[in-house]
Amino acid sequence: MAANRKVIITCAITGAIHTPTMSPHLPVTPEQIAEQAIGAAEAGAAILHLHARDPKDGRPTPDPDTFLQFLPRIKEGCGAVINITTGGGHGMTIDERLRGPLRLKPEMSSLNMGSMNFALYPMLARYDEFRYDWERDHLENSRDYIFRNTFKDIERILKVLGEGCGTRFEFECYDVGHLYNLAHFLDRGLLKPPLFIQFIFGILGGIGADPDNLTHMHRIADKLFGDDYLWSVLAGGRHQLSLVTMGSVMGGNVRVGLEDSLYAGKGRLATSNAEQVSIIRGILEQLSLEVATPDEARQQLALKGADQVSF
């Protein structure tokens, strides 16, 4: 799609990758998630991408009751689009990953467009001790883990969540083949434009965080989808800021947040999600790019509206 005049900032608040030991600023309790989500929206995020965590030890959880401890507060505290994960966390079944979205019926959900190796275990070398026992196992088990997203799984999510709940998707594409998977579903008439495609770089098992890969993904998406899509850039770890800035210059949207990177500069932990949003917003404005409001994002992405959710 032609360069958007207003850039949508997505903020991924907590995710299921980083663990509590890695940063004291990673939100894990419902109160922390709500506070940081509202802060990110106030800083300029139009979309809030959300996972839930067990408040006792910070481990990822698919429990819709845990989501409901923070979603109403976020909805009351800001006007941002709430985007609920269908990716869940390592080891969750498809049924578990769908528990929250099917009950909550959000405006948006993430949808991963292919099965893949999804390796977190290299982070083990950075820490001598962990706050909770589950953290080490969580990272080590990724050495022998396949993140399942089969064609049958994707068809099911499109039908029960997309068609059944009116939820639209952030299509997460970790490699070029995922774009072709997405095109397959579009060709079959299971999707309706505009598509919102998240190019994801820097996860071990997916495409690398290289500027050449960003231009390649963009070129292939243009070839496959023409004017039927909007796109955004997500880059893991230290690659976050440089690649999302490059994407914005190329006409894309951006995603930041503590799910994707814990830092706000070399060697400096971000103190909040809002800090990362403020940094990228400042860069966008210096580039003379306008930031989209939540309602402008809703219009661009043809969302059903916050009054149509179940929380």
Image: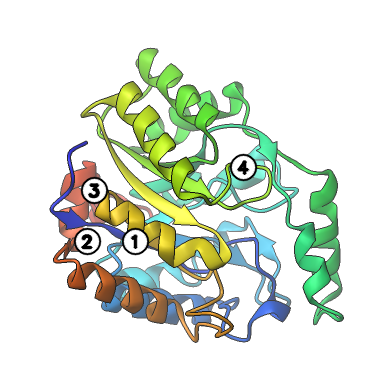
* Tag 1: amino acid: Thr
Task: Relative to 32, say whether 214 is above or below.
Answer: above
Q: Is the residue under label 4 in contact with that under label 2 (CB below 8 Å)? A: no
Q: Secondary structure at mark 1?
A: helix
Q: Tell me the mark number nearer the camera, choosing from 2 and 4.
A: 4
Q: Is residue 256 visible?
A: no
Q: Position of residue 273 (x, y in %)?
A: 44, 76
Residue hosting label 1: 245
Residue hosting label 4: 206
Earlier residue among tags 1 and 4: 4
Earlier residue among tags 1 and 3: 1
Instruction: Pick whichever, 83 or 63, lies toward us.
Output: 83
| On-image quarter of the N terminus | top left
Q: CA distance from mark 4 to mark 3?
A: 23 Å
Residue at 59% in and 22% down = 152
Q: CA distance from mark 1 to mark 4?
A: 20 Å
| On-image quarter of the C terminus | bottom left
* Tag 3: amino acid: Gly
Q: Tell me the mark number nearer the camera, choosing from 3 and 2.
A: 3
Crowding near the residue tagged with mark 2, few <14, some 14–19, many ≥20 C-alpha atoms within 10 Å: many
**Residue 95 position by quadrant:** top right
Instruction: Pick whichever, 91 or 175, lies toward us.
Output: 175
Crowding near the residue tagged with mark 4, few <14, some 14–19, many ≥20 C-alpha atoms within 10 Å: some
The image's colour scheme reads: rainbow
Q: Is residue 179 left or right of residue 236?
A: left
Q: CA distance from mark 3 to mark 2?
A: 18 Å
Residue hosting label 2: 294
